Image (tube, helix red, strand yellow):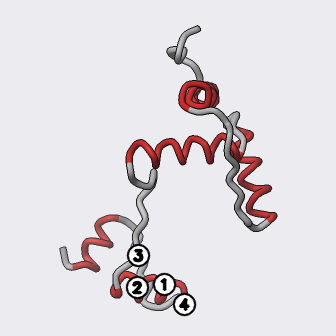
């Protein structure tokens, strides 16, 4: 059995990788439970199914990556004060500027 087939579609690659990680790295002898919104679970389940994965596959892949890399598999940031204020202004529709093209934008910025 080949570990990963070359030149296969991404969805098949992810499904095969998930299956391989499960078979090679762990026996399923523990459970993880989490309370989440029903709609969120349904939406995520549908997206994952389109990739050939289950929610359990995603949890298994994510936890494997966290354990191996000792870090989250994505970047988490809290915006600084200026960024948070700017985002809040945008949400309120304040201080929004539009440009008709790149030259107009540069003119507005004084560049």
- Give the farthest residue toward the front: 29
Q: Nearer the viewer, mark 3 or mark 2?
A: 3
For the point 73% across and 66% down, the residue is 36
| 104 w.r.t. 69: above or below | below
Instruction: Identify the residue under disc 2.
Output: 86
Question: Are circles 2 and 4 on residues that touch, CB within 8 Å?
Answer: no
Q: Earlier in the sequence, mark 3 or mark 2?
A: 3
Question: Are circles 3 and 2 on residues that touch, CB within 8 Å?
Answer: no
What label sits on residue 92 in the rendered view?
Answer: 4
Q: Can you give x and y, in whole percent of width and height, for residue 43 in the image? A: 75, 56
Question: Are circles 1 and 2 on residues that touch, CB within 8 Å?
Answer: yes
Q: CA distance from mark 1 to mark 4?
A: 5 Å
Q: Residues within 10 Å of mark 4 (few under 14, many from 20)?
A: few
Q: CA distance from mark 3 to mark 1?
A: 17 Å
Q: Earlier in the sequence, mark 3 or mark 4?
A: 3
Instruction: Identify the residue under disc 1.
Output: 90
Task: Quadrant for residue 104, please give it.
Answer: bottom left
Q: Looking at the figure, which quarter contains the C terminus?
A: bottom left
Q: Is residue 11 visible?
A: no
Q: Secondary structure at mark 2?
A: helix
Q: Secondary structure at mark 4?
A: helix
Q: CA distance from mark 1 to mark 2?
A: 6 Å
Q: Secondary structure at mark 1?
A: helix
What label sits on residue 2 in the rendered view?
Answer: none
Instruction: Identify the residue under disc 3.
Output: 78
For the point 61% across and 31% down, the residue is 22
């Amino acid at each position: 059995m080949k570990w990963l087939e070359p030149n296969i579609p991404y969805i098949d690659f992810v499904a095969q990788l998930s299956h391989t990680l499960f078979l090679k790295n762990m026996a399923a002898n523990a459970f993880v439970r989490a309370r989440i919104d029903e709609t969120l679970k349904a939406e995520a389940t549908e997206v994952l199914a389109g990739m050939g994965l289950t929610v359990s596959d995603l949890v298994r892949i994510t936890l494997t990556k966290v354990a191996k890399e000792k870090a989250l598999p994505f970047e988490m940031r809290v915006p600084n004060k200026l960024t948070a204020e700017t985002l809040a202004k945008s949400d309120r529709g304040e201080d929004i500027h539009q440009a008709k093209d790149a030259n107009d934008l540069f003119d507005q910025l004084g560049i």
